[in-house]
Amino acid sequence: EKELAEMQEKIQRTVAECKAKLNDKTEMKDVDDCLMPIIVLNPDDPAILGLKSQVEVMVSARLEKAERKAEYQAQVRRFKTQFEKAEQLEKMGETLSAAKAYQSLISSSLPDPDNLKEKGKRQLASLQENILQQQTNFERSADEDFKKGDFKSAVQNLKKAQELAPENETLKG
């Protein structure tokens, strides 16, 4: 019985020492190495099993957190890529496509830690103003061409205006 008490004390002491070494980077191998001297004494001891269970929970939680972080970073990258695509379309002069891309970006539910949505809103407002100005210029040119009797140019200008504002019922005729 004395041996049993000594063995139990050694197990408790070693488990306490191993517990004291736990940190947020502890792996199961670390605990197994720490428990090595006493595991042969009683591998089913509740203190040993409890410590191992605690470390399994810690490791599992750490892996889940890493997965969530990786998913978040992937979503942030997707959002930035959408923004860069909209900017590229704008630089290429694809005004309508850029406006649609910015609109999609603004309505996106992806995380935006760099506040690109606000920049996208400003870019979209600028593009919409530019589109309206171009549309007005084409309509004015069409009106002038019509008054001059240059119907072909008038129709071409109206078509250009309609391309800029396909939803405008007045331009559809």
Image (cartoon, grey):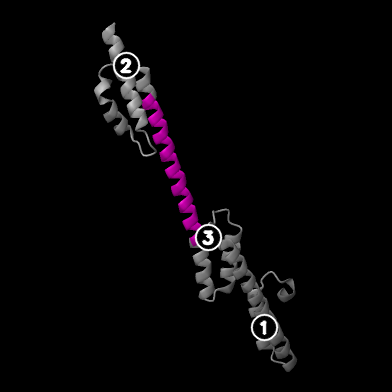
Mark 3 or 1: in front is 3
Q: Which residue is mark 2?
A: 9
Neighbours of disc 1 within 10 Å: few (<14), some (14-19), many (20+):
many
Distance CA(mark 3)–CA(mark 1): 38 Å
Labels 3 and 1: the sequence-earlier one: 3
For the point 48% across and 61% down, the residue is: 81
- Secondary structure of the residue carrying tag 3 is loop
Instruction: Give the numbered dot on residue 124.
Output: none
Q: Which residue is mark 1?
A: 138
Q: Which residue is mark 3?
A: 114
Left or right side of 148 for 19:
left
Residue 136 coordinates in the image, percent (x, y): 70, 81
Q: Quadrant of residue 117?
A: bottom right
Left or right side of 16 for 134:
right
Start and end of the magenta stretch?
A: 51-80
For the point 27% across and 21% down, the residue is: 38
